[in-house]
Image: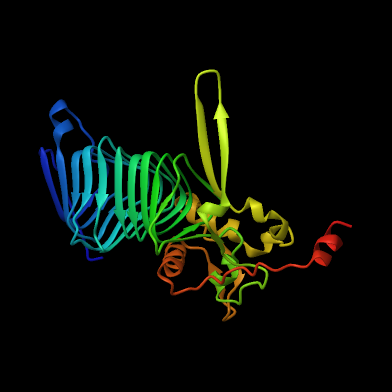
Amino acid sequence: MKELKEIRFNDNKVLLKDNLVKGSIIPEQVSDLTRDITIQADTIIEGAVYAHRLEIQNGECEIKGAVFTQLELYVNADAKGNVVFRKSVGSVDSIVSRASECHLTFQSDINAKSVTLYNAFVAGSIYADEVVMENCVVIGGVFASQGLEMNNCIVGTFNTPTISINGTIQLLLPSAFSIEKMIMAPEARLYNLSLADLGSLFKGLPQAPESGRVPLNPDVDEVRTTLTNEEIQKTLRSYTIVGKVLAADLIDTDKFQNHFLLAAAALGPQLLKTYDLGPDKDGKSAYLSFENLRAFFFNILQGTLQVKEMEGNFSISQVTQKYR
């Protein structure tokens, strides 16, 4: 990034371009509560941001503190470059980015009434009434109180009343939940990666023979649970691989090192040092930097790195030997 100009301001409308803001942009008087902020390009804000509306027209942009907006946070559809939020982002109304060529990164949680994200990486979780995502990676969970739509995404888990999916959806944790039956497009596919050898894949090594992603069929792998109390009754649907636990119990999942990958991706901004998984295929250290992890999960999402499918075969002799 080129050298930026430091700026100080007290205006009700703020335009930032080629600026370094030393500190926060927060209200100091009542009139500041309606302040709109527009980031045109090449801006770093070192503190927190409070705005009526925050618009990002182009990268490079980095906000190191928490962000909160009264109306919306909006990234222009034609934005390019890197846009990074280091801490939590919240909005009373909406958070929207449909930019197909922008590298959008949230290193913590997102909380808003509605969230629409394209090509975004979220290290934390998303909490909203309605969520729409396309070509996104969410290391944590997506918790939508009204509805969730996903197209070609990787998520840790989800919990929502209604869900519709398209493309390939891959889960990092063993289970996900909805109340209504999942709506799947004819070409949609659902997989679980909790038994995949992500550690070897990250290091460029061969994946363990007994590992792999597990296809999920919502009609077959759905587990229905009815919760009742004195007043209401609710049915919860779980899309889970616990039904395949017999075969899964034959696998030493600790050696896959998946938990290190997920923890490093979720806690990256809080970690005091960069850890590594050991030597990669070239004998060099496979560092778990946030940038490496972001690229890794997007390579899986885009199919550049192929997670092999788990073979569904195991012998009864294996089972009896394990439990003798």
Q: Is residue 80 in sight in this rendering?
A: yes
Of residues 239 and 41, the one drawn nearer to the viewer in this rendering: 239
| Nearer to me, 113 or 58 | 113
Vertical position of residue 139 compared to residue 73: above or below: below
The quarter of the rendered structure image containing the N terminus is bottom left
Left of 216 or right of it: where is 68? left
Compared across the picture, whether 69 is left or right of 256 comes to: left
The quadrant holding residue 137 is bottom left
320 over 71 or under it: above or below: below
Q: Position of residue 210 (x, y in %)?
A: 68, 69
The quadrant where residue 129 appears: top left
Residue 263 visible to an observer of this rendering:
no
Q: Nearer the viewer, residue 251 or 53?
A: 251
Residue shown at 49% from the left, 51% from the top:
267
18 with respect to 115 (left or right) = left
Task: Identify the image quadrant of the C terminus.
Answer: bottom right
- 146 displayed left or right of 236: left
Residue 41: x and y in percent read 18, 59
Percent x, y of residue 79: 20, 61
Percent across and percent down for residue 235 are: 51, 35
Q: Residue at x 66, y 56 (%)?
A: 244
Residue sitting at x 17%, y 27%: 29
| Residue located farthest toward the top when viewing the structure as drawn | 230
- Which residue occupies the extreme right position in the image? 324
